[in-house]
Image (cartoon, rainbow, N blue to C red):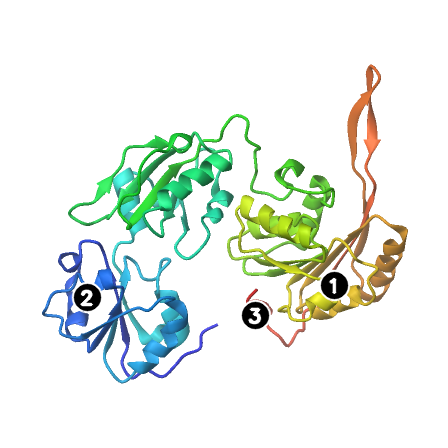
Amino acid sequence: MTTEAPHPHPVALIGIGADGWPGLPDASRAALRTADVILGAPRQLALLPTECTADRVPWPSPLRPAVPALLAAHADRRLAVLASGDPMFHGIGRALAEVVGPTALDVHPHPSSVSLACARLGWPVEDTDVVTSVGRPVDRLAALLHPGRRVLVLSADADGPAAVAALLRDRGFGPSPVRVLERLGAPDEHLTRAQRADAWTRPPGAALNLVAVECVRAPDAVALGTVPGLPDAAYENDGQLTKRHVRAATLAVLAPEPGELLWDVGGGSGSVAVEWLRAHPSCRAVSVERDPDRAERIARNARTLGVPGLRVVTGAAPDALDALPAPDAVFIGGGLTAPGLLDRCWAALRPGGRLVANTVTLESEALLAEARHRHGGELVRLAVAHAVPVGRFTGWRQAMPVTQWAARKELDAATPESVRHQGDGA
């Protein structure tokens, strides 16, 4: 959410590449010459010539929390901010827009490192997936690994390429060719030759680098698709797992949309929350699990499957729900008989939100029937059978049927649906 602060002068946000001052267009140079203060990383500030007479202020670490105070401290002066490449692409532009508002920014973009990398590799930008490990776990790469896909990873430092290679090996994509592109745009830029991830021997190079991956899955790796219903074998579990076919049906009625927040109550192995997050990079989820061992397992599954942003809360519902932001959807996979749980979840839902609850017991089924009577929705029975050997023949083995209640909370006609995604981080 934007929290605009008064600023008498537009903040000049200048994208700069590794080629420094010579690579800047005239408009960017003019903004830097007339600035009273220039904020930037020490590496970026060192690229400026002496004709830029402004006070040079390096960013502190951590950077993001310091942005509002730094902007306020220099609010009465002409301020320029340096950013790598395109400031609005995985850059400081987002934080600045949230503080001063987008209309108070004068943005001068430079070609991003992704554009330069695709130009050097001959990869179409629109067909190339991008993930950053700058200030974020490299595990996020795992969600993008599919045979034939090309991925660029924005590295945090010189050790980034080795971390990418190790992840590819661990996630079943060891045969993938990997290249490192260092100091793109600078006179000494360097592109390494491709090397398989599972044979990675390259020592750390330049800190400023991208990693290019052409995804090749190992023959014995588990295939993970892009739709809900990943194989059960993809999850570490102790038996508390929403099985594949029921999970796919559950996610279908939960219907994740970009930016929405899910409460996964009684997380078990975290499979529903994990696949909710895999639906779109902006989706958010909180998994609530009372058993500490299972809570740790949920976090491991999330990292393994490329969604390390899953928030895991260890505690018993409904008490563990009290401090959580209001959800757009709730899945109850366990603990339905806990007093007040169902009512607490329904009350917490944002207008237009969905609640889905699964059970295999008669006691919980009675609760769902009563909830349908009060709130409407749909009550269904999901039954799955698998073909198994019966002597020399084949027969069906029936899994325990699952009763599912799914309902949508009425959207207040006076409230725009867009407000559902405002505020409340997870």
Q: Residue 372 location in percent, x, y?
A: 83, 61
Q: Amino acid at mark 3?
A: Asp
Q: What residue is disc 2 on? A: 28
**In the rendered image, which quarter contains the C terminus?**
bottom right
Q: Is residue 202 above or below residue 328?
A: above
Q: What residue is disc 3 on? A: 424
Counting residues from the start of the chain, the first of labels 3 and 2 encountered is 2
Residue in the image at 29% along x and 38% along y: 122
Q: Is residue 161 visible?
A: yes
Q: Is residue 254 above or below residue 148?
A: below
Q: What residue is disc 1 on? A: 317
Q: Amino acid at mark 2?
A: Ser
Q: Is residue 356 above or below residue 217?
A: below
Residue in the image at 15% along x and 47% along y: 187
Q: Residue 267 location in percent, x, y?
A: 69, 53
Residue 354 found in image quarter: bottom right
Is 417 left or right of 238, judged from the image as shown? left
Given residues 58 and 246, the one toward you in this image is: 58
Which one is in front in this view, the residue at disc 3 or the one at disc 2?
Answer: 3
Given residues 60 and 1, the one toward you in this image is: 60
The number of callouts visible is: 3
| Mark 2: few/some/many CA within 10 Å (<14, 14-19, 20+) | many
Find numbered disc 3 in the image and state the secondary structure of the residue it sits on: loop
Q: Amino acid at mark 1?
A: Ala
